[in-house]
Amino acid sequence: MILVTGGAGFIGSNFVLDWLAQSGEAVVNLDKLTYAGNLNNLATIDGDARHTFVHGDICDGALVLSLLQQHRPRAIIHFAAESHVDRSILGPGEFINTNINGTFALLEAARAYWSVLEAGEKAAFRFLHVSTDEVYGTLGPNDPPFTETTTYAPNSPYSASKAASDHLVRAYHHTYGMPVLTTNCSNNYGPYHFPEKLIPLIIANALAGKPLPIYGDGMQVRDWLYVSDHCAAIRRVLADGVPGQVYNVGGWNEMTNLDVVHTLCDILDRQAPKQGSYRDQITYVTDRPGHDRRYAIDAGKLERELGWKPAETFESGIRKTVQWYLANQAWVANVQSGAYMSWVNKNYANRETAQ
Ligand code: NAD
Ligand code: TYD
């Protein structure tokens, strides 16, 4: 079995759903259920005996170690993080706590568990750390895309905290020989994406008749990847990645924010027509402080060495995404009203946290 952290968030829940659809191997899913964690994301595997959900914090080393000793996973896939750049600007503390201290606590628990495994299990064990392209900083318009050897230059509290966690993971390989793998991925989009991030926010605001906020001039560039392609890349790296190595994951799909928003408006104009175009709702707002201008990933190593390529183009992925949001407006309403949180409070208020 495998242990996943942060499996009730956007990418983690997509990963758990895809994993159980493709493999018989059980998953223990450790998640603190912050505002970004939503058990509704896992509703389709309710009652599936292969999935064990544990409500807990990665910073709680004793809890993590007891889970490892109880379930004896062959791998840890570490998604849990604070992930929203704007929130990291308004309040960096929780980013330092979860992304740095939490990763450290997880690594320490993993080391205690791993170091006493018998030789075969010890060699086969993997700690896969899911990270971001934002650790590399920002690119000029003509710079080549980020490779695995690009110098780290994080610019936001979020990316700095992820960079710190990447360094810790690297050090556990070099110092202790722990079989770690790190993936640095570009911006994801797809189902269960929390509507504070650009793509789901634009879809939700468009349908609600609200302004579509564009930071600054909207000419910032991101390299978008459909979330199931990221999940497939993680499975490839877990299966055949070389311990200690880093793999960049990206969609070969650079777009300006304005182009992304125009594309969304045009699809919505066709699929949910209203009087006038959704483009009329576009509103330019003050830019994000320290806003990185351009991210782009060179995913050549992953393709050459492990044979991974994205299955979706931006056109196919974004169409699926809009369709998912149109078909799941109750999910969005639930998130926006906070109803999923009150359910969590009701469900967990009187429960012991697993120890
Ligand atoms: P998310 O914010 O949607 O989900 C994070 C999950 O982690 C939530 O379920 C939350 O409850 C959980 N969590 C937070 N703090 C925790 C703690 N202390 N203990 C246990 N669980 C905790 O994030 P996401 O977009 O799914 O990102 C997942 C990972 O992928 C992150 O590490 C992020 O840095 C990385 N990543 C994200 C993107 C992207 O575009 N979203 C791109 C590249 C890499
Ligand atoms: P986001 O989804 O927050 O991801 P990240 O900052 O990690 O790349 O933002 C994607 C891009 O969209 C980023 O350049 C900021 C921009 N953006 C807006 O223009 N308006 C918005 O309301 C949001 C949330 C983001």
Image (cartoon, rainbow, N blue to C red):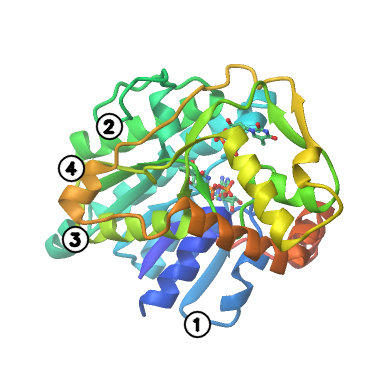
The residue carrying mark 2 is: 147
* Cα–Cα span, label 2 and label 4: 24 Å
Q: Position of residue 73 (x, y in %)?
A: 34, 65
**Residue type highlighted by circle 1:** Ala
Q: Is residue 243 above or below residue 69?
A: above
Q: Secondary structure at mark 2?
A: loop
User: Which residue ends up furthest to the left in the rendered image?
Assistant: 119
Residue pictured at 26% horizontal, 33% vertical: 148
Label of residue 124 in the image: 3
Q: Which residue is mark 4?
A: 177
Amino acid carrying mark 2 in the image: Thr
Q: Which residue is label 1 attached to?
A: 49
Contact flag, marks 3 and 2 (Cβ < 8 Å): no
Point out the tag, 3 or 4, that comes first from the N-terminus. 3
The amino acid sitting under disc 4 is: Gly
Q: Position of residue 45 (x, y in %)?
A: 56, 77
